Amino acid sequence: MDDSEVLVSSDQKMEDASTVNPIPPSSDDSGESDSESEDEAESNHQIETLESELSANPYNYDAYVQYIKLLRKTANLEKLREAREAMSAMFPLSPSLWLEWARDEASLASSDNVPEIVKLYERGLSDYQSVSLWCDYLNFLREFDPSVNTPDGISKIRSLFERAIPAAGFHVTQGNRIWEGYREFEQGILDTIDKADLEERNKQIQRIRSIFHRHLSVPLKDLSSTLITYKAWELEQGTDLDIGSDDLSKVSPQVAVANKKAQQMYSERANLEENISKKDLSDTEKFQHFMSYIKFEQTSGDPTRVQAIYERAVAEFPVSSDLWIDYTSYLDKTLKVGKAITHAYSRATRSCPWTGDLWTRYLLALERGSASENDIYAVFEKSLQCTFSSFEEYLELYLTRVDGLRRRMISTSMVETLDYSLIRETFQQASDYLTPQMQNTDSLVRLHAYWANLELNIGKDLAGARGVWDSFLKKSGGMLAAWQAYIDMEVRLGHVKEARSIYRRCYTRKFDGTGSEDICHGWLRFEREHGALEDFDHAVQKVTPRLEELQLIRLQQESAPVKPSAGVKEHNPQKSTREKRKAGPNVEEESSAKRQKSKGQKMNDEEAEGKTATVPNKKSKSETEKAADSKREESEGAKPVKPKIFTDECTAFLSNLSAKAQEEDIRKFFSDVGGVASIRILHDKGTGKPRGLAYVDFVDDEHLAAAISKNRKMLLGKKISIARSNPKKGKKDFARRGNEGSGNSKDASQVSDKAKEPLGGETEGEKRGDEVEVRGKNTFAIPRTVKALGFTTPKPIADETPKSNDEFRNMFLKK
């Protein structure tokens, strides 16, 4: 069999190769011209649509595949090349796509563009090791390379076959194609040697025999057929062998042993090969079978075979980040350093660019391989252009980059000279990018602590280290850990005055949890260990009032009443509905809210009679309720009455909140401000869904002002609005507009402060339940239960008797 026939016949078996003609010929049949025009118009329309999709989203893998398919159909060679190059720049192409591309270019090949097509095959093999692509590559060179029959050309082909054997020759089911092609290539050379040149012929015969021996020692499918072929070949060379026997002792005892072992190894792997070759498997099942196969090969201990099965797995599952991490970790353990490792990482990051762990490992592999600073920096910059699932992955990349720079700067074996400014620039870039995204996190404190440490130890710049902390605290001053780390740095350096100065700056700040107390106690402990008596006394003088203030605030926060959630009605567990019906009209049955409403409706009657503000015909509490109240007081115990310090003057009103916002989210949002006393998120009474509104109480006006300064900041993806809550002002404005509409020149809401003083800041009308005043040109009389906008109840006349409904009706009829 001719050697070219072997490779060509192998190509016909390629399962992953495209069967579409490279550039379809045009038809001259006039009868099909109309249908072809319609097809061409439809294809052009689809091409334009796909071009728009790829322009909007260049990472659409499926759109690229369809786009290339349509361009091949329309024979638009220039656009086809551009599309393939663009897709190759974005993704590693599958072996079938590379094979299709190479065949299209090979169909137009001439002696001038052979080097370009060779580069194309090499690019394809750098993505994935494919038996089919290797066979096609070798076949192309033997057919089109004019130097193939020269000594240099023969050496070139041999070196390619030797590269192909470890890459694809160990493929259990398809590896035979590489070995057979190699053997037939050498047989073709033997046939061209003059029979009279015995020395050269014997040398070539020995080369072919060596290929046979190597082939027979590899566990591949159909080894028995290979053995028969080998014996037939030896008979042609004059060796006495029994073709029907497996005995190879007459040829070489070592080959006989190796072949027996290879056949045994294949039998151990036959079941594993069958599992991964099944057609009806799901991706998950097939992946698990591959992983079982990989573990089996790792147990066997042959790194070449382990690498071969990994290559087959990543070709089947190119976007499995777990598989790539497993593969590269194995290479790190076994090969340690070398181009094979960095090349594997390069392919892994192109296949799964969204996995930060792969980029981090890639940087470490380059450093182990003593890569140049330019190469490492290029990979680092490329990694920052990717999108990861968390900002922690970006942080890990920055830290890995700094680690590498630090190690190489202090290494005595480094050829390159690196400047510390590279570390400072990396830290600055990391801080600028991550601080807005990871604000108030321990990871960010760790980054800046590392930075300040290197400024001291490598940069030898104390002012630079302090600048790192000062700059960070301007953005994250509410983090106790940042202040403590800054203080620890000064203490380690023996700078007592500077550490004391930092304590003075931060002991009055509001920190989360017990942070405010911790920083105060920390100052006292610092002065006890490092300061003089005068310094300790001064710290006590400063810290003691602060601790008392914090204790009072905490007590007040604990005593703040818990308000019932919206839509939940108050329920009196002491009385059932049946008991209320039996109690009769003389027993108080109304809730506190209803009693307040009744009080407002009947206030005029009570004041007209000169009585105190009690409801007519209303008796004191029933004996049942008194007993219940007494029992409740006994169960709760005597509780001290604590003043409520949170008023509307220290309340912020939040709007445009995300529906996902919870109380802990809002509290975390104001963590740098501190002083949050309570949070009330408003919900719709009908649906119970959040309305995007909330009230936040603060302990004092200082904290409220700091909170308002965060207006229009982002919370859970939305810019929230923060303003001071002033419900009384809103009521006054509302009442003023009502009076203006009624023609009353005097605004009923404009009550003098002097009039409010006897009632503790409330008007008399407010004390009586917000009753309204009957006044105005166009108002004759209104029922007492109706509250008109803008009116307040006038002071009643002592001898005025409330009018009945009949009296009101008579007054109206007289008019």
Image (cartoon, rainbow, N blue to C red):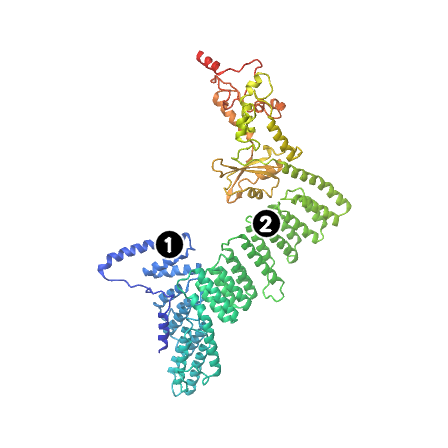
At label 2, the amino acid type is Thr
Residue identifier under label 1: 51
**Label 2: which secondary element:** loop
Residue 205 against residue 468 in the figure, above or below:
below
**Label 1: which secondary element:** helix
Residue 764 as seen in the image, left or right of residue 252: right
Residue 616 against residue 520 in the figure, above or below:
above
Q: Distance from label 2 to label 1 (Cα)?
A: 43 Å
Residue 296 against residue 787 in the figure, above or below:
below
Label 2: how many Cα within 10 Å (few below 14, some 14–19, many 20+): some
Q: Quadrant of the C terminus?
A: top left
Residue 561 as seen in the image, left or right of residue 10: right
Q: Which mark is residue 11?
A: none
Residue depicted at x 58% and y 24% = 767
Residue depicted at x 38% and y 64% = 101
In the rendered image, which quarter is residue 560 located in?
Answer: top right
- Tell me where residue 315 appears, x and y as whole percent: 44, 64
- Tell me where residue 53 appears, x and y as whole percent: 39, 52
